[in-house]
Amino acid sequence: MLYLIGTNILIAYQSAQASQKMLDVVELALGDGAHISVVNRIEFLGWHGFTPAARLAAVALLDALAEHPLDSAVTNKTIELRSNLKMKLGDALIAATALTHGLGLMTRNVDDFKNCGLELLNPLD
């Protein structure tokens, strides 16, 4: 299964505190052709705490991933998820992107996505 990588996984992967297990699982997903939503790019790079070097590393990481834009299919799926499951906008956009493109979701926040029909993977489990 190919995965869309959640923002919290990207942040943990870039941190100095990432466990070896987390690094191994994420690197396996990256090697298999992991994906992100444009929302992940916005959330991840929008963090104000990056040093210039860390921001360059984060951009390089994201540029190596397949990125999906917001299009009408993702928009319509987002509306469906928000109206049926009362999901937060960011979560619904990310879930809708994964669902629209037939991807699983790698996230530490599996509870936020458990009722939307996604295959979920928490690399810390």
Image: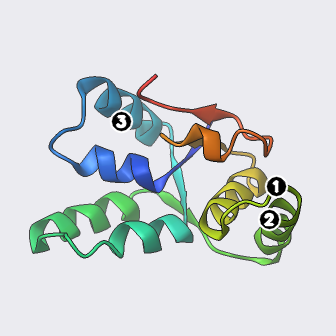
**Residue matched to label 1:** 85
In front: label 2 or label 3: 2
Could you tell me which secondary element the residue under label 1 belongs to? Answer: helix
Tag 2: Cα neighbours inside 10 Å, few (<14), some, or many (≥20)? some
* Image-based side of 94 in relation to 79, left or right: left
Can you say whether 55 is above or below 118 in the image?
Answer: below
Going by the numbered disc 3, the residue's amino acid type is: Glu
Could you tell me which secondary element the residue under label 3 belongs to? Answer: helix
Q: Quadrant of residue 84?
A: bottom right
Q: Which mark is residue 27?
A: 3
Percent from the top left, x then y, of residue 20?
24, 25
Could you tell me which secondary element the residue under label 2 belongs to? Answer: helix
Given residues 50 and 63, the one toward you in this image is: 50
Going by the numbered disc 2, the residue's amino acid type is: Arg
Percent from the top left, x then y, of residue 36?
53, 58
Which residue: 24% across, 37% down? 18
Q: Quadrant of the N terminus?
A: top right
Whole-number angstrom distance, CA of label 2 to CA of label 3:
31 Å
Q: Answer whether labels 1 and 2 touch (C-beta < 8 Å).
A: yes
Percent from the top left, x then y, of residue 34?
51, 46
* Image-based side of 113 in relation to 27, left or right: right
Which residue: 34% across, 31% down? 22
Tag 1: Cα neighbours inside 10 Å, few (<14), some, or many (≥20)? few
Q: Quadrant of residue 94?
A: bottom right
Q: Which mark is residue 82?
A: 2
